[in-house]
Amino acid sequence: MPQSPIHVVIHHLRSAAERDGAVSTDGELLTRFLSQRDDDALAALVERHAPMVWGVCRRMLRNPHDAEDAFQATFLVLVRKAGAVVPREMVANWLYGVAHQTAVRLRATAAKRGVREMQMIEMPEPAVAEAREDELLLLLDQELSRLPQRFRAIVVLCDLEGKTRKEVAKQLGCPEGTVASRLGAARAMLAKRMSPHGLAVSGGSLAAAFSQSAASAGVPNSVVSSTIHVATLLAANQAVGVISGPVAALTEGVLKTMLLKKIMATTLVVLAVCVAAITGGSLALGQTEGTGKPVDKPPITAEKPIDQPPATAKANSKPEGVKRPQEKEAITVPANAKAEPA
């Protein structure tokens, strides 16, 4: 008799804990999954980052069923694109980006279906000063997703996953002071980016809002277990007919968007290199021409003038065979010739 998904999950987590004492880093777990297709490593990654991913999905999607689809699709994308996580210790940051992108895509799809139109009519937006906490968090996620990677990763680990600066420093392999400075800079950037939305908040209050949201995420065990079950089947190429239609479509849509972004980024790099090469060539040419040295040109050879006959010769010249006026031919008479009588 086949085991239920929850029993499979418990088995994977117990195996992972017994093997590594539950101290394997994200990079180690990801490496094991990539090299060995280790189901236990995959289950541990899902279990470890489930609260953070669920928090993003719930903040972005009020419908719990939509949140479940986005949650599951996020980890299915991880199964398909695990090799794209670089460096491998940045799994949490990578998952945050995928979860936000997945939730945004699902929100757009739901809006097209008109699911939220009645809500917007019946519940008009409150004044900016009275913005609700969920709207504040929605804006925070929007701005956090736009931060540079090195700053966003620190916020995700410290504020969304509740790790200490010491733990984050050890995980990322950098000094604790670097973590502290980047965290402070990231919070300051977030606070500044909230100003155009009419929200005057401090970095500390933003951190508290994220932490409170993460603590109250409360991801359902059934969602985690079903996601691990489907993800392990997908990793083994046995997920045909197991993944629901909406989740499969959402996963493929996110993967396609990621591919397009990669192509665009590569194209921009190539264009930048071409522009730099053309600009450099133009500058080099301009410097060469601006040295003041004359440009070598072939010498100009004067053409030899055509000899003109003298004026007298021209006057006396006549076409061949044409007689001059008054000109008679001389008659030569032989010496011994006799004159004929008249």
Image: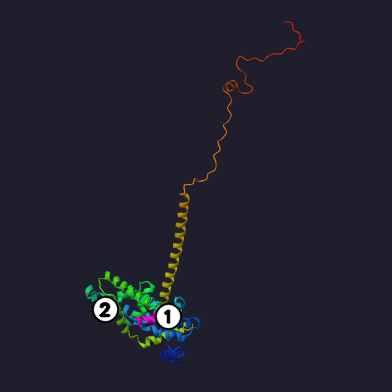
Q: Is residue 278 above or below residue 111?
A: above
User: Can you tell which mark lies on residue 133?
Assistant: 2
The residue at 46%/62% (across/down) is 273
User: Relative to the observer, which residue lies in front, 217 or 32?
Assistant: 32
**Is residue 239 shown to the viewer in this render?**
no
Q: Is residue 311 above or below residue 158?
A: above
The residue at 29%/80% (across/down) is 208
- What percent of the width, then of the height, locates residue 74? 40, 79
Three-letter amino acid code of the residue under disc 2: Glu
- Mark 1 — residue? 76
Question: Residue extending furthest top?
Answer: 342
- What percent of the width, then of the height, locates residue 73? 40, 80
**Is residue 132 shown to the viewer in this render?**
yes
Three-letter amino acid code of the residue under disc 1: Leu
The kind of secondary structure element at disc 1 is helix
Main secondary structure type of the part rendered in magenta: helix
- What percent of the width, then of the height, locates residue 4? 42, 91
| Sequence-wise first label, 1 or 2 | 1
The kind of secondary structure element at disc 2 is helix
Question: Residue extending furthest bottom?
Answer: 1
Q: Is residue 168 magenta?
A: yes
User: Relative to the observer, which residue lies in front, 295 or 140?
Assistant: 295
Magenta range is 160-170
Characterize the local packing of mark 2: few (<14), some (14-19) or many (20 or more) Cα atoms within 10 angstroms.
Answer: few
Which quarter of the rendering shows the C terminus? top right
Question: Residue extending furthest right?
Answer: 336
> Separation of disc 1 and disc 2 at Cα?
30 Å
Labels 1 and 2 touching (C-beta < 8 A) = no
User: Can you tell which mark lies on residue 24?
Assistant: none
Q: Is residue 331 magenta?
A: no
